[in-house]
Image (spheres, helix red, strand yellow):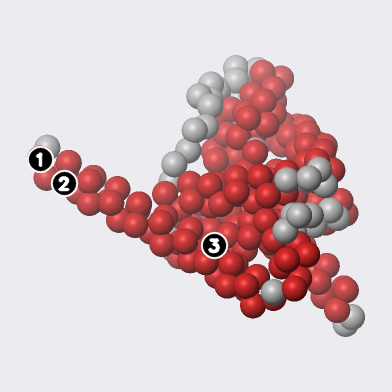
């Protein structure tokens, strides 16, 4: 297998993994929006809503991939992804209030709008991991979306049971973020001349995210336990 094919496969697996790690909220959106519908109508709402959301997301990612070629936006995207990775670890979320749809099309509309509002993390992460390759973007989403639809509940339970999966996801996001920053037009020549500094920078970003996120989780757990003892 040639190195270019191997790189393509590894990048595709990276995108699928990132999309699954960041899809927990989106899976909840789908369930909440369609919860008032019955049987076949509920399935239809989930399929149509998710399909519409995927089309919008592909368009958005293509736009972001193009925008990341603008000077300094790659740096900004990388910094934003570091924040997203930290929030993934700490469990912080600013998702919209999801109201269950009473009809098929109201549920479909809710899924699409809510997914668009909550999809910034996925868009930035996948655009960075794709490295300007639109085929990777489309294939990654097409592979991960069926898993999100039919296996979302299982995947969420898996993450809740094995918390280390979240740490791997945050680490992968950290790697993607540091690669985006290092790939910035004004920074890339310096990085190319100092490969050791590049490696150290990647390690520092990943370690910083994991350490800060872990300490925040420990603090939140202690605070919750302290509050529970007083109740």
As measured in the structure, the alpha-carbon distance from the residue carrying label 1 to the one carrying label 2 is 7 Å
Q: Secondary structure at mark 1?
A: helix
**Of circles 3 and 1, which is in front?**
3
**Residue farthest toward the left in the current orientation of the protein:** 230
Please count the marks in the image. 3
Q: Residue at x 60, y 39 (%)?
A: 26
**Of circles 3 and 2, which is in front?**
3
Q: Residue at x 73, y 66 (%)?
A: 190
Q: Nearer the viewer, residue 102 or 141?
A: 141
Pointer 2 residue: 226
Q: Residue 18, image x and y in percent?
A: 64, 56
Give the answer, above or below, for where 88 lies relative to 43: below
Q: Quadrant of residue 163?
A: bottom left
Residue 91 showing in the rendered view: yes
Image disc number at residue 205: 3
Pointer 1 residue: 230
Residue 88 showing in the rendered view: no
Q: Residue 156, image x and y in percent?
A: 51, 51
Residues marked 1 and 2 touching at CB (< 8 Å): yes
Q: Secondary structure at mark 3?
A: helix
């Amino acid at each position: 297998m040639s190195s270019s094919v191997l790189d393509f496969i590894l990048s595709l697996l990276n995108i699928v993994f990132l999309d699954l790690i960041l899809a927990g909220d989106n899976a909840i959106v789908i369930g909440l929006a369609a919860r008032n519908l019955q049987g076949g109508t509920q399935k239809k709402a989930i399929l149509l809503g998710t399909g519409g959301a995927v089309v919008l997301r592909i368009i958005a990612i293509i736009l972001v991939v193009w925008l990341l070629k603008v000077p300094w936006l790659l740096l900004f995207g990388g910094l934003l992804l570091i924040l997203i990775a930290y929030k993934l670890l700490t469990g912080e979320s600013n998702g919209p209030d999801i109201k269950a749809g009473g009809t098929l099309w109201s549920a479909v509309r809710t899924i699409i709008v809510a997914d668009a509002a909550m999809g910034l993390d996925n868009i930035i992460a996948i655009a960075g991991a794709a490295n300007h390759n639109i085929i990777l973007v489309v294939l990654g989403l097409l592979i991960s979306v069926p898993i999100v639809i039919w296996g979302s509940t299982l995947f969420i339970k898996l993450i809740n049971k094995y918390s280390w999966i979240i740490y791997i996801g945050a680490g992968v996001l950290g790697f993607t973020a540091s690669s985006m920053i290092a790939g910035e037009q004004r920074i890339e020549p310096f990085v190319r001349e100092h490969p050791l500094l590049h490696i150290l920078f990647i390690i520092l970003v990943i370690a910083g995210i994991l350490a800060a996120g872990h300490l925040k989780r420990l603090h939140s757990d202690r605070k919750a336990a302290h509050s529970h003892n007083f109740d």
